[in-house]
Amino acid sequence: MESHLKQLFPAEEIHIAVNRLAAEIRGDYAGKTPILIGILKGSFIFLADLIRTLKMPLEIDFIRAASYGAIDVSSGAVRITKDIDAGIENRDIIVVEDIVDTGLTLDVILKHLRAKKPASLKTCALIDKPHRRQMSIKIDYLGFYAKDVFLVGYGLDYNEKYRYLPGVYVMEKA
């Protein structure tokens, strides 16, 4: 492990949070087949664990938006670089995000998806960092809160590095 990484959420805690979130979602969507839309790239590990834990009928799709690049703070300019393939009109949608920080990316994606007229649109995030919030975002299913620190691991990256780590780590300035 690199010396500038300090574990914040170990894999065991993440597993417990994923189980809790799956139970909440199963309860809310009993008898329904929601479409879970993962925000690439960061959410893919969380989404995979979540859908395996849900053990219910569902569909998945992906959307990708870019706002960071090779820097560790959002540029503020968000653009959708990969749209969903599924038709979502009159469907129940859960947008799955790894981390909500400023809220800019999720706000753009939610507006984009609302325009497609889903029956319902909810959000599920592994981590919320509300300290830097610029947009009012409601997170319906939340794993953890975190302080204003830069996080990597469990799908979260810095310049495409560290996604493979099983837990979530604070990347301290070296």
Image (tube, rainbow, N blue to C red):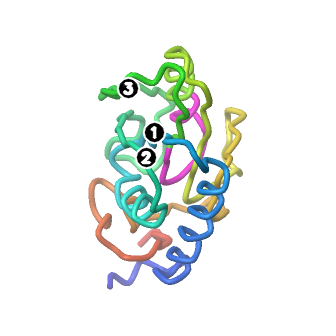
Identify the amino acid type marked 1.
Ile
Residue 74, position as x, y percentages in the image: 48, 40
Above or below — where is 96 with respect to 62? below
Sequence-earlier tag: 3 or 1 = 1
User: Which residue is under mark 2?
Assistant: 58
Above or below — where is 111 with respect to 128? above
Please name the residue shown 41% across and 52% down the image.
Answer: 43
Residue 68, position as x, y percentages in the image: 40, 41
The boundaries of the magenta stretch are 96-107
- In which quadrant is the C terminus drawn? bottom left
Give left or right: position of 107 versus 165: right
Give left or right: position of 24 versus 12: right
Cα distance, mark 2 to mark 3?
24 Å
Specify the quadrant of the image occupied by residue 84: top left
Pointers 2 and 1 in contact (C-beta within 8 Å): yes
Specify the quadrant of the image occupied by residue 114: top right
Magenta-colored stretch includes residue 106: yes
User: Which residue is under mark 3?
Assistant: 80
Please name the residue shown 34% across and 74% down the image.
Answer: 165
Q: Nearer the viewer, mark 3 or mark 1?
A: 1
- Indicate the secondary structure of the residue bearing disc 1: strand
Identify the amino acid type marked 2.
Leu
Q: Nearer the viewer, residue 30 or 24?
A: 30
Number of marks drawn: 3
Magenta-colored stretch includes residue 99: yes
Identify the amino acid type marked 3.
Ile
Question: What numbered label is drawn on residue 35?
Answer: 1
